[in-house]
Image (tube, helix red, strand yellow):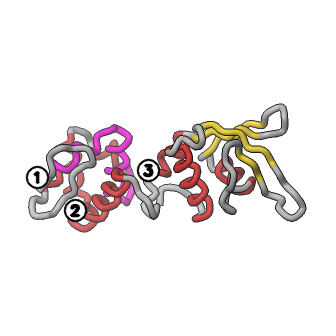
Amino acid sequence: MIHNLTEKQLQALRWIMKQVEDDVLQESFIVISSATPASPDAILISGIEDLPDYINAGALDALSITRILASNRTPGGATRYTLTGEAYRVAAFDFNNPEPDPINFYMRETYYLIQKHFNREELERACFELGFQPDWVFGDKTDWPLHLLLYLYRQNRLGDLPPVLEKLRPGIDWLPYPGNETAVN
């Protein structure tokens, strides 16, 4: 796991990211507390009628503490929340998301195949094939497949991986990178 969020916090992040994707929310949005004695964490978000129960002040504060959201109090007592880069990183590697995006699906499945079919020395060879030093990727980390995928993701080079994997392990049914026209067989 590359984050320390609870399942409820992940659920809240997934909901926020979906609202941004659907243009219901902007990356930066205002929240007004509507707390009552019966609902001390109740909030209002402009433009959204019915919030799920798990979207409340506690969830947003927890996401702020973990730097998923940046929060700033406004003069009127409301709070402006803004998605951070960390929110996008966590969402991209949310392997348990019930509605994964194609890149997330590719990374999850490729992770499991690499884990099953490669050892560290073989992954170091893959790094050389991709044109970079294994130390840049692995350092003293132990989950080598994950760190290789994270490194390639950060470098915007995930699409370079399927041909290298196919070359090093031709008998495996590697997934093509989403968006690549040619599939790896």
Q: Which of 178 and 112 is in front in this view?
A: 178
Kind of residue at badge 2: Phe
Q: Which residue is depicted at the point 66% across and 60% down?
A: 52
Q: Where is residue 65 in the image (x, y as percent from the top left)?
A: 68, 49
Q: Is residue 155 magenta?
A: yes
Q: Which residue is depicted at the point 63% across and 37% down?
A: 28
State the SS at label 2: loop
Q: Name the residue under label 2.
A: 118
Q: Residue 167 carries which label?
A: 1
- Tell me: residue 40, above or below residue 74: below
Which circle's residue, 3 or 2, is located before the other in the chain? 3
How busy is the neighbourhood of tag 2: few (under 14 within 10 Å), some, or many (20 plus)?
A: some
Tag 3 near tag 2, CB within 8 Å? no
Q: Which mark is residue 65?
A: none
Q: Mark 3 or 2, which is nearer the eye? A: 3
Q: Which portion, as a residue range, is magenta? A: 139-164
Q: Mark 2 or 1, which is nearer the eye? A: 1
Kind of residue at badge 3: Ala
Question: Is residue 144 visible to us here?
Answer: no
Q: Does the magenta stretch include residue 93?
A: no
Q: Where is residue 50 in the image (x, y as percent from the top left)?
A: 68, 56
Q: Position of residue 64 (x, y in %)?
A: 67, 47
